[in-house]
């Protein structure tokens, strides 16, 4: 079993405190232990249920905004071919066609990647600080180890939060790219599908919950619809995590149909993009869908983004949505 020193700094949503966690990470992924109290950082590959790479820290340290020292593992990587625009548009139309012939196939999130050359003198710690300012309601992190590589991100989507008294999750879907746009039927329906997915899981498992109705939230210059759920505290939280992950916001509906379509057609190794990332700290576990993230490769970065495709999607619009999502993070790398 391989091991490596891992370091991560992070900031929870709507908070100002920045923390450092560092420890030994192994190349063996394990199930999240929601009952352990040690400070811990987690990152999971796409479609990995409740398993994640993790490392523990006996002590964590508050960092100040002036602290910029953060040693990075600088990996090398061979990029697979990222889809061209024409190929992505063709893929969207293929998904729409299959949805027209299968009423259970309601949505699929199709991801793509692109690379961007950057200066080798770039300061990722400063970029992390800038992201914290630009995205105050996101989970912001910077992670580096030989096993995971170096990733930085700002996720707007809570996957699961557990405190001593309750559990929370959210339905987040739909994207507006400027303040003048209004929510249309396609976007509202996409969000409702995510709500129904969560509510169906909770009702089938006989788990009592309360719901805060949909509101518009900002993620930089993008806007999303979000409904939040508070669930009674339960013992089988790993089962709940496995049921929720991956969500319709990172995969689609019906889940197995969407996963099959992604596996057969997307031709992208998502790695940690659209898996989950998070921490245990102060007796609470906070897990987020790993969206708006970048893989750092020394002299270039790899950007990831996806769009939720339904039978009402306009392929050109979905392409532009992925471009805007990539730019939400790519703008910090000059």
Image: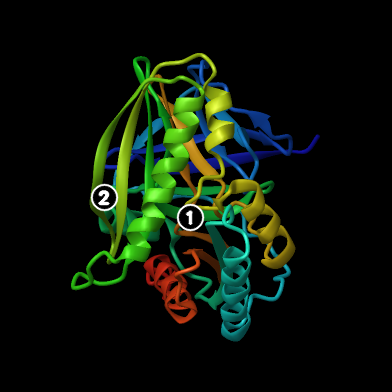
| 38 and 222: which is toward the camera | 222
| 67 and 134: which is toward the camera | 134
Eyeballing the image, is 323 above or below 239?
below
Q: Position of residue 125 (x, y in %)?
A: 41, 55
Eyeballing the image, is 87 above or below 26?
below
- Who's the residue at 55% across and 40% down the image? 245
Judging from the image, what secondary structure is the residue with disc 1 in? strand
Q: Position of residue 248 (x, y in %)?
A: 50, 49
Q: Is residue 205 left or right of residue 190?
A: right
Total count of labels: 2
| Marker disc for residue 152 | 1
- Who's the residue at 54% across and 18% down the image? 236
| 279 and 200: which is toward the camera | 200
Eyeballing the image, is 140 above or below 41?
below
Badge 2, how many Cα within 10 Å: few under 14, some, many 20+?
Answer: many
Badges 2 and 1: C-beta atoms under 8 Å apart?
A: no
Q: Could you say which quadrant of the image residue 300 lies in?
A: bottom right
Quadrant holding the N terminus: top right
Q: Nearer the viewer, mark 2 or mark 1?
A: 2
Q: Earlier in the sequence, mark 2 or mark 1?
A: 2
Eyeballing the image, is 87 above or below 24?
below
Q: Is residue 64 left or right of residue 274?
A: left
Q: Is residue 208 left or right of residue 16?
A: right
- The residue under label 2 is 136
| 331 and 72: which is toward the camera | 331
Residue furthest toward the left?
180
Report, in whole angstroms, how far the alpha carbon at label 2 lies from the one at label 1: 15 Å
């Amino acid at each position: 079993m391989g091991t490596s020193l891992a370091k991560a700094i992070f900031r929870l949503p709507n908070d100002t405190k920045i923390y450092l966690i560092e420890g030994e990470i192994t190349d063996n992924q394990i199930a999240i232990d929601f009952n352990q109290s040690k400070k811990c950082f987690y990152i999971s590959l796409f479609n990995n249920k409740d398993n994640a790479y993790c490392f523990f820290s006996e002590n964590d340290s508050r960092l100040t905004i002036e602290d910029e020292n953060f040693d990075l593992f600088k990996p090398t990587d061979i990029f697979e071919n990222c889809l061209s625009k024409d190929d992505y548009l063709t893929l969207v139309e293929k998904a729409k066609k299959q949805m027209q012939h299968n009423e259970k196939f309601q949505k699929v999130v199709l991801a793509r990647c692109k690379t961007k050359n950057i200066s080798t003198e770039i300061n990722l710690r400063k970029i992390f600080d800038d992201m914290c300012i630009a995205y105050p309601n996101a989970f912001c992190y910077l992670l580096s180890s030989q096993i995971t590589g170096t990733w930085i991100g700002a996720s707007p989507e809570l996957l699961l939060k557990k405190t001593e008294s309750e559990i929370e999750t959210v339905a987040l879907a739909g994207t507006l790219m400027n303040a003048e746009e209004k929510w249309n039927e396609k976007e509202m329906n996409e969000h409702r599908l995510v709500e129904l997915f969560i509510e169906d899981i909770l009702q089938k498992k006989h788990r009592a919950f309360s719901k805060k109705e949909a509101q518009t939230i900002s993620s930089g210059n993008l806007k999303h619809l979000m409904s939040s759920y508070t669930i009674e505290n339960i013992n089988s939280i790993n089962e709940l995590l496995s049921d929720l992950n991956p969500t319709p916001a990172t995969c689609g509906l019906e889940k197995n149909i969407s996963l099959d379509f992604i596996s057969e057609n997307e031709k992208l190794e998502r790695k940690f993009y659209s898996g989950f990332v998070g921490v245990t700290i102060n007796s609470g576990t906070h897990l987020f869908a790993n969206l708006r993230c970048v893989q750092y490769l020394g002299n270039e970065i790899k950007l990831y983004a996806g769009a939720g495709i339904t039978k009402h999607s306009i392929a050109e619009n979905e392409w532009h949505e992925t471009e805007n999502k990539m730019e939400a993070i790519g703008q910090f790398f000059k």
